[in-house]
Image (tube, rainbow, N blue to C red):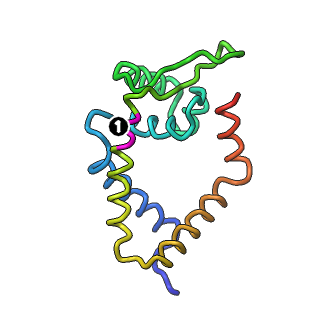
Amino acid sequence: METSQSIGMLLHDVARLLQEQAARSARPRALTDGQWQALRAIAKHEGIHQSALAEMVRMEPVSLGRIIERMEDKDLVERRDHETDRRKRLVYLKPKSQSLLDRIDDRGRVIGEDLLSRFSASDRQLLHRALSLIKTNLLGPDEEGRAHEARHD
């Protein structure tokens, strides 16, 4: 199959367009992009310490700290002290954030269905497998382990 665009550029363009669509359609108006990104990451890795979260969402720790403060003010998250390391603060969701995340997930499913509406079931499975393999190749063997360790440090 001949392509005029590299797979990397195509993935970049699709990711950017998808992110823009999600920001327009799924992200709650009450949250900034940074808050939304942090909230989604906290939901996936609840109890993560702030420095690992900053690395995960590719933000400076000070900037992320301000974002977390604003989310605490909105009663979406809370910070707790680490049991054995007083230097670490762990971030947890509060009940109010769960209903917000449920609405985001519902809207995200609708967007996903719209995006894949012309795909057959087998093409969807193939796309999922291919993108999962690309992600695995990019992350390398240690990345998943580091996310797990960040939750339990």
Position in image of residue 86 (x %, y %):
66, 12
Position in image of residue 102 (x %, y %):
38, 43
Q: Note whether 101 is above or below 24 in the view shown.
A: above
In the figure, residue 16 lies in which quadrant?
bottom left
Residue at figure coordinates x 38%, y 53% from the top left: 19
Q: Note whether 55 is above or below 14 in the view shown.
A: above
Does residue 59 appear left or right of residue 32 in this picture? Answer: right
Q: Which residue is mark 1?
A: 100
Prevalent SS, magenta region: helix
Residue at figure coordinates x 69%, y 40% from the top left: 146
Q: Check residue 132 for magenta coloring.
A: no
Q: Secondary structure at mark 1?
A: helix
Q: Which residues are magenta?
A: 98-102
Report the number of numbered marks: 1
Does residue 150 appear left or right of residue 69 in this picture? Answer: right
Residue at figure coordinates x 50%, y 37% from the top left: 43
Does residue 120 appear left or right of residue 30 in this picture? Answer: right
Question: Amino acid under label 1?
Answer: Leu
Residue at figure coordinates x 46%, y 79% from the top left: 4
- Residue at the top extreme of this rendering: 86
Neighbour class for label 1 at 10 Å: few (<14), some, many (≥20)?
some
